[in-house]
Image: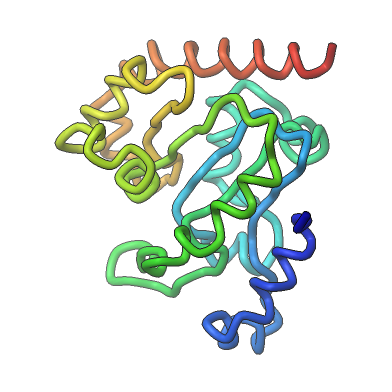
Amino acid sequence: MTTIEEIKQHIITDPENKVFTQQGWQPIFMAYPEAKILIIGQAPGIRTQEKGQVFRDKSGDRLRQWMGISEETFYHSKKIAVLPMDFYFPGKATHGDLPPRKNFTEKWHPALIDCMPNIELTILMGTYAQKYYLKDKAKKNLTETVFAYEDYLPTYFPIVHSSPLNFRWFAKNPSFEEKIVPKLQQLVKKLLNQSSL
């Protein structure tokens, strides 16, 4: 059976990732066999890439707040896993970062998810993750998908990306934090409490 560490080494030595490996960058993801909750996001930002750990930025602070968990729980409980759609910072675009590379998710996610048999909930964070995993079940745009989150339970919970760049979306959709975030917190708390029994 292939282990998470073995897969990581395959990612590092993959010729498609050579340009990143030559810079001394490690693939940015977090996976444990014990994980109960999987977060699938976009791709690491430059700050996260340089720190070498998922969500070490303002996006991560907001995400943990939305989930109602501490940094300790997020990073050290081994109950939370994070698989971005690309494990390397893709570069800067005119506004924000470049999108994740195509086909990266298809190549690496299945093997890593197979190593995490206890996942009970997958949080799909942003358009890229939602389109890939929900396929034709996604609504016509991110906002509709996020507000229809109950349609995807108990397997998936779609949310907007927690990036500060989404401040306009947060301002236009205050009911997300008022009504949906508490539901996410309840579900996360329930799953983490179950896993500690």
- Quarter holding the N terminus is bottom right
Residue 106 in picture, x, y percent from top left: 45, 59
Residue 10 in picture, x, y percent from top left: 69, 73
- Tell me: 41 left or right of 32: left
Kindly identify the residue that appears in the image at 27 percent across and 39 percent down.
168
Residue located farthest toward the front when viewing the structure as drawn = 1
Residue 72 in picture, x, y percent from top left: 80, 34
Q: Give the answer, above or below, for where 19 lies relative to 128.
A: below
Residue 66 in picture, x, y percent from top left: 53, 25
Kindly identify the residue that appears in the image at 62 percent across and 66 percent down.
49
Kindly identify the residue that appears in the image at 61 percent across and 49 percent down.
55
Q: How many marks?
A: 0
- Tell me: 37 left or right of 178: right
Q: Give the answer, above or below, for where 159 lies relative to 182.
A: below
Kindly identify the residue that appears in the image at 54 percent across and 60 percent down.
44
Q: Nearer the viewer, residue 171 or 91?
A: 91
- Tell me: 107 left or right of 56: left
The quarter of the displayed image where residue 97 is located: bottom left
The quarter of the displayed image where residue 2 is located: bottom right
- Quarter holding the C terminus is top right
Indicate how the structure is coloured in the image: rainbow
